[in-house]
Image (spheres, coloured by chain):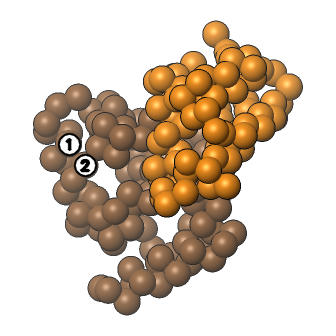
Amino acid sequence: MTDDAQARIDAVVKNNAAVLFMKGSPLFPQCGFSSRAVAILDHLDVQYESVDVLQDQGVRQGIKAYSDWPTIPQLYVNGEFVGGSDIMMEMYESGELAELFQGAAAAE
Amino acid sequence: MPMAAAEIEAMILAAIPDARVEITDLAGDGDHYAARVVAPSFAGLSRVRQHQAVYAALGGRMGGVLHALQLTTAAG
């Protein structure tokens, strides 16, 4: 992992209201967990940026250190780490994820 | 080399002794698991912190030999 990757990750996280680090793209997810994360966000009909970690080894490893989280996908909203696909699913089912995005939209 | 369900449970209990752990082998292949971990010591911790505690218990295997572990946690 390089400091350069950490700086690039930090810039993406801080400069987007919502960003999903995933394997593949929202159109073509390359992993079941990333696919589930995309499906949740699509259900909520919210805007988000996505970063395909398979395109950048520095980001792929660096994002795990950035959040102290061992797996991908990872969702960030308002610069804060929200969780992986399991936490996204729990928060989707409880309505918390929709509330989080409503708050994010209101803050813009 | 996949991990056995009993091994996953033992590692979680070693690090979080007050936890109740339920492990389901989702595909019957010893490689795709769901775990539910409920522990009184999770009280006051965010979901992210609760999951991080379980991942720490698994000592770096998560995302490595343990690719597919659906995790739910709760205090209680």
The residue wearing badge 1 is A6
**Residue B5 shows which numbered tag?**
none
Quadrant in the picture for residue A87:
bottom right
Quarter of the picture containing the C terminus of chain A is bottom left
- Count of numbered marks: 2
Q: Position of residue A54 (x, y in %)?
A: 41, 36
Q: Which chain is orange?
A: B
Q: How many angstroms separate mark 2 from mark 1 (CA)? A: 5 Å
Please tell me whether residue B69 is drawn above or below residue B76 in the rendered image: above
Q: Is B71 in front, or is A27?
A: B71
Labelled pair 2, 1 in contact (Cβ < 8 Å): yes
Q: What hue represents chain A?
A: brown
Task: Look at label 1 and name its amino acid.
Answer: Gln
Secondary element under disc 2, as helix, strand or loop, is: helix
Secondary element under disc 1, as helix, strand or loop, is: helix
Quadrant in the picture for residue B1:
top right
Label 1 lies in what chain?
Answer: A
Quadrant in the picture for residue A62:
top left
Quarter of the picture containing the N terminus of chain A is top left
Please tell me whether residue A93 is drawn above or below residue B55 in the rendered image: below
Q: Position of residue A97 (x, y in %)?
A: 55, 72
The residue wearing badge 2 is A9
Q: Position of residue A92 (x, y in %)?
A: 63, 68
